[in-house]
Image: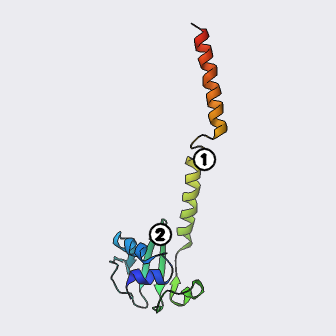
Amino acid sequence: MRIDKYLWCVRYFKTRNIATTACKKGHVRINDAVVKPSRDVYPSDKIIVRKNQVQHHLTVLDIPPNRVGAKLVDIYRVDTTPKENFDHLELLKHAKDHYRKQGTGRPTKKDRREIDDYLEDNLDEDQSNY
């Protein structure tokens, strides 16, 4: 079975097209070699998939006949992703919150009114000085 189809069948990607694109970008490795989407997968292959800045490590147990349900995925692969990879993702989430707090982007309606009031007060003071 092709690697893009395998990753789609075991539900690592929502569509086969997304899996193909990931292979073309070099986000998929089999036995530490970057592969094309047409590369065949065999049982006992070690796959590394980079998805959402996390490197998922898989071991192929069997080839599914077609896309399988979420409960049956463990029959066809073993996820050996180290816990440190997920800890790195949590660290990235906290770092993103540190640099830009929620709600500090575009001003809210209340913020805009306060800015307008402030500007009007400053304009009145500037005009009174003349």
Disc 2 target residue: 51
Q: Residues within 10 Å of mark 1 (few under 14, many from 20)?
A: few
Label count reads 2
Which quadrant, please, contains the N terminus?
bottom left
Circle 2 residues within 10 Å: few <14, some 14–19, many ≥20: few
Residue at disc 1, secondary structure = loop
Q: How are the colours assigned in the image?
A: rainbow
In which image quadrant can residue 90 be found?
bottom right
User: Is residue 126 rendered to the left or right of residue 53?
Assistant: right
* Whole-percent x, y for residue 118 in the image: 63, 25
Closer to the N terminus: mark 2 or mark 1? Answer: 2
For the point 50% across and 89% down, the residue is 76
Query: In this view, which residue lies farthest toward the top?
Result: 130
Is the C-beta separation of discs 2 and 1 under 8 Å? no
- The numbered dot on residue 71 is none
In-front residue for pair 120/33: 120
Q: Is 75 in front, or is 33? A: 75
Quarter assignment of residue 47? bottom left
Residue under the image location 46 percent in, 76 percent down: 15
- Measure how far apart labels 2 and 1 are at the Cα level: 25 Å
Q: What residue is rendered at 56% in x and 53% in y?
A: 95
As shown in the figure, which amino acid type bears the numbered disc 2? Lys
Residue 60 in the image, given as x and y percentages of width and height: 46, 87
Residue 97 horizontal/vertical position (percent)? 59, 51
Residue named by callout 1:
101
Residue 25 falls left or right of residue 115? left
Location of the C terminus (image quadrant): top right
Amino acid type at circle 1 is: Lys
The x and y percentages for residue 88 are 54, 63
**Helix, strand or loop at disc 2?**
strand
